[in-house]
Image: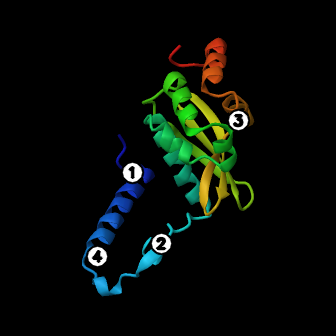
Amino acid sequence: MDYNHPYTRLGALALAAVATLGVTSACSSDDEAPSGSAAAAAPAPEQKTLDGAKAAAQTVFDRFSGGDFAGAWELYTAAGKKAISKADYVKLNEVCSRKGLAITLTSARMEGADRAIVIAKQLVAAQSYTMIYEKDAWKLEPAKEGLALYKLGAAKAIAVQKKAGTCANA
């Protein structure tokens, strides 16, 4: 593993920041804590930048390749979530996806203010993905082919992938 990789350094920096925030917030006075619903503040919006899109994309890829399909689904656009339920997405991917093979972001570019195109590689295959800035966060937009497959539901989508020879565990 390359410990000098930018994402490794970014992850270490993020962990250090979280640890520092945890320590400093543990030392603060209760007198300063807001009361009621203000205490449960909404998370800060993600950066609406290419770096923000790349970080969000890598998170999706890490969750997916690590087998956290429910977590990957959470990072889909509203259209992606509408096309397939979380339960069906998990079932489809548990049957047909290759878990444990890292997906690495190789390049990215902005396409307007709210859209980024990222290229990711798994083994020797590279593919482009679209990230959309939606509700203060970058989300993965499934390709049209993926949306069409998802709309079939898990059972039919698994059958289609097995027939096409694209189900990894068939």
From the viewer's side, name the closer residue of 153 and 169.
Answer: 153
The amino acid type, in three-letter code, at marker 4 is Thr
Q: Are marks 4 and 2 in contact (CB under 8 Å)?
A: no
Q: How far apart are marks 4 and 3 (CA)?
A: 45 Å
Identify the residue shown where x is 45% and y is 38%.
Answer: 68
Q: Is residue 27 left or right of residue 149?
A: left
- The secondary element bearing badge 4 is classed as helix
Name the disc covering residue 24, or none: 4
Decide which of tag 4 and tag 2 comes sooner along the chain.
Answer: 4
Q: Name the residue under label 2.
A: 41
Q: How far apart are marks 4 and 2 (CA)?
A: 18 Å
Nearer to us in this view, 36 or 102: 36
Q: Which of marks 1 and 4 is in front?
A: 4
For label 3, the residue is 147
Q: In which quarter of the image is the N terminus?
A: top left
- The kind of residue on which mark 2 rests is Ala
Q: How far apart are marks 3 and 1 (CA)?
A: 32 Å
Q: Which amino acid does label 1 sit on?
A: Thr
Local crowd size for mark 4, using a 10 Å CA cut-off: few (<14), some (14–19), many (≥20): few
Question: Please, what secondary structure does the residue beneath circle 3 have?
Answer: helix
Query: Which of the two discs, 3 and 2, sits closer to the camera?
Result: 2
